Amino acid sequence: MNVIQQLEKEQQKEKVPALRAGDTVKVHAKVVEGTRERIQVFEGTVIRVTGGGLRQNFTVRRVTHGVGVERTFMIHSPRIDKIDVLRHGDVRQGRLYYLRGKVGKEARIRERRQLTRGPEAEAKENGEEESEE
Protein backbone atom coordinates (compact mmCIF):
# COMPACT_ATOMS: atom_id res chain seq x y z
CA MET A 1 0.00 0.00 0.00
CA ASN A 2 1.54 3.29 -1.05
CA VAL A 3 1.38 6.66 0.71
CA ILE A 4 -1.62 7.98 -1.22
CA GLN A 5 -3.73 4.91 -0.40
CA GLN A 6 -2.79 5.21 3.28
CA LEU A 7 -3.85 8.87 3.40
CA GLU A 8 -7.14 8.08 1.66
CA LYS A 9 -7.86 5.23 4.06
CA GLU A 10 -7.31 7.52 7.07
CA GLN A 11 -9.76 10.11 5.72
CA GLN A 12 -12.57 7.67 4.87
CA LYS A 13 -15.56 7.39 7.19
CA GLU A 14 -16.10 4.06 8.91
CA LYS A 15 -19.88 3.77 8.64
CA VAL A 16 -21.29 4.76 5.26
CA PRO A 17 -24.68 3.48 4.07
CA ALA A 18 -24.82 1.61 0.77
CA LEU A 19 -26.41 4.08 -1.64
CA ARG A 20 -27.94 3.26 -5.01
CA ALA A 21 -29.85 5.28 -7.56
CA GLY A 22 -33.52 5.52 -6.59
CA ASP A 23 -32.97 5.61 -2.83
CA THR A 24 -34.67 8.34 -0.82
CA VAL A 25 -32.21 9.87 1.63
CA LYS A 26 -31.86 12.60 4.23
CA VAL A 27 -28.43 14.22 4.11
CA HIS A 28 -27.42 16.18 7.21
CA ALA A 29 -24.88 18.70 5.87
CA LYS A 30 -22.96 21.29 7.88
CA VAL A 31 -23.50 24.82 6.55
CA VAL A 32 -21.32 27.78 7.56
CA GLU A 33 -23.04 31.16 7.81
CA GLY A 34 -20.59 33.82 8.88
CA THR A 35 -19.11 32.64 12.17
CA ARG A 36 -21.92 30.18 12.91
CA GLU A 37 -22.16 26.60 11.76
CA ARG A 38 -25.44 24.68 11.63
CA ILE A 39 -26.76 21.43 10.20
CA GLN A 40 -29.10 21.63 7.21
CA VAL A 41 -31.14 18.61 6.13
CA PHE A 42 -31.51 17.95 2.40
CA GLU A 43 -34.06 15.22 1.62
CA GLY A 44 -34.58 13.79 -1.83
CA THR A 45 -33.99 10.99 -4.31
CA VAL A 46 -30.52 9.80 -5.26
CA ILE A 47 -30.27 10.13 -9.04
CA ARG A 48 -26.66 8.99 -9.42
CA VAL A 49 -23.69 7.58 -7.52
CA THR A 50 -20.26 8.03 -9.09
CA GLY A 51 -16.63 7.45 -8.26
CA GLY A 52 -15.12 5.07 -5.79
CA GLY A 53 -13.22 5.08 -2.53
CA LEU A 54 -12.56 8.52 -1.13
CA ARG A 55 -13.78 10.23 -4.32
CA GLN A 56 -17.25 8.65 -4.26
CA ASN A 57 -20.07 11.15 -4.57
CA PHE A 58 -23.83 11.13 -5.08
CA THR A 59 -26.40 13.56 -6.43
CA VAL A 60 -29.71 14.12 -4.64
CA ARG A 61 -32.75 15.67 -6.33
CA ARG A 62 -35.85 17.16 -4.74
CA VAL A 63 -38.63 19.41 -5.94
CA THR A 64 -39.26 22.48 -3.77
CA HIS A 65 -42.09 24.89 -4.58
CA GLY A 66 -42.29 23.53 -8.12
CA VAL A 67 -38.56 23.99 -8.76
CA GLY A 68 -36.23 20.99 -9.07
CA VAL A 69 -33.08 21.28 -6.96
CA GLU A 70 -30.11 18.95 -7.33
CA ARG A 71 -27.16 18.85 -5.02
CA THR A 72 -24.01 16.73 -5.21
CA PHE A 73 -22.33 15.52 -2.02
CA MET A 74 -19.04 13.76 -1.39
CA ILE A 75 -19.79 10.72 0.75
CA HIS A 76 -16.62 10.95 2.86
CA SER A 77 -16.69 14.75 3.20
CA PRO A 78 -16.25 16.17 6.71
CA ARG A 79 -19.10 18.58 5.84
CA ILE A 80 -21.59 15.69 5.90
CA ASP A 81 -22.74 14.85 9.41
CA LYS A 82 -24.79 11.76 8.54
CA ILE A 83 -26.82 10.14 5.78
CA ASP A 84 -30.16 8.48 6.57
CA VAL A 85 -31.64 6.11 3.98
CA LEU A 86 -35.43 6.34 4.22
CA ARG A 87 -36.45 4.10 1.30
CA HIS A 88 -34.71 1.86 -1.19
CA GLY A 89 -35.96 2.48 -4.71
CA ASP A 90 -36.49 -0.26 -7.30
CA VAL A 91 -35.03 1.12 -10.55
CA ARG A 92 -33.24 -0.38 -13.54
CA GLN A 93 -30.98 2.49 -14.53
CA GLY A 94 -27.87 3.68 -12.77
CA ARG A 95 -28.55 7.34 -13.64
CA LEU A 96 -32.07 8.70 -13.16
CA TYR A 97 -31.79 11.82 -15.30
CA TYR A 98 -35.23 11.09 -16.75
CA LEU A 99 -36.75 12.29 -13.45
CA ARG A 100 -35.88 15.86 -14.46
CA GLY A 101 -38.68 15.79 -17.01
CA LYS A 102 -41.27 14.29 -14.68
CA VAL A 103 -43.38 15.96 -11.99
CA GLY A 104 -45.75 14.67 -9.31
CA LYS A 105 -47.05 11.11 -9.66
CA GLU A 106 -44.94 10.51 -12.76
CA ALA A 107 -41.77 10.98 -10.72
CA ARG A 108 -42.62 8.26 -8.19
CA ILE A 109 -40.28 5.30 -7.77
CA ARG A 110 -41.36 1.85 -6.57
CA GLU A 111 -39.95 0.69 -3.25
CA ARG A 112 -37.55 -2.26 -3.32
CA ARG A 113 -38.96 -5.00 -1.13
CA GLN A 114 -36.92 -7.51 0.83
CA LEU A 115 -37.95 -11.15 0.78
CA THR A 116 -39.74 -11.85 4.06
CA ARG A 117 -39.62 -15.32 5.53
CA GLY A 118 -42.49 -16.96 7.36
CA PRO A 119 -42.30 -18.56 10.82
CA GLU A 120 -41.94 -22.08 9.35
CA ALA A 121 -38.75 -21.11 7.51
CA GLU A 122 -37.29 -19.66 10.70
CA ALA A 123 -38.25 -22.79 12.70
CA LYS A 124 -36.44 -25.06 10.22
CA GLU A 125 -33.41 -22.81 10.33
CA ASN A 126 -33.26 -23.08 14.13
CA GLY A 127 -33.43 -26.88 13.97
CA GLU A 128 -36.97 -27.16 15.29
CA GLU A 129 -39.19 -29.79 13.66
CA GLU A 130 -42.87 -29.24 13.03
CA SER A 131 -45.06 -32.00 14.40
CA GLU A 132 -47.90 -33.08 12.12
CA GLU A 133 -50.86 -34.58 13.97
Image: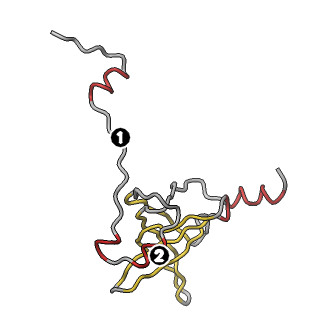
**Residue situated in front as seen by the camera: 51 or 55:** 51
Label 1 crowd (10 A; few <14 / some 14-19 / many >=20): few
Label 2 crowd (10 A; few <14 / some 14-19 / many >=20): some
Query: Rounded to the nearest whole Å, what is the CA distance between mark 2 and mark 1?
Result: 36 Å
Label 2 or label 1, whichever comes before in sequence order: 2
Q: Residue 107 is drawn in which quadrant?
A: bottom left
Callout 1 amino acid: Leu
**Residue situated in front as seen by the camera: 128 or 110:** 110
Q: Position of residue 81 (x, y in %)?
A: 52, 67
**Residue situated in front as seen by the camera: 131 or 75:** 131
Helix, strand or loop at label 1? It is: loop
Q: Quadrant of the C terminus?
A: top left
Residue, x 41% and y 82% (percent of image)? Answer: 68
Residue that badge 1 annotates: 115
Residue, x 63% and y 63% (percent of image)? Answer: 56
Count of picture labels: 2
* Above or below: residue 66 compared with residue 25: below
Helix, strand or loop at label 2? It is: strand
Callout 2 amino acid: Ile
Q: Position of residue 112 (x, y in %)?
A: 37, 52
Residue, x 47% and y 70% (percent of image)? Answer: 28
Q: Do the residues under discs 2 and 1 have CB atoms within 8 angstroms?
A: no
Seen from this angle, which residue lies furthest right?
A: 2
Residue that badge 2 annotates: 39
Left or right, 73 with respect to 83, comes to right
Q: Position of residue 48 (x, y in %)?
A: 53, 67
Nearer to us of marks 2 and 1 is 1
Q: Position of residue 75 (x, y in %)?
A: 58, 65
* Res. 41 visible in picture: no
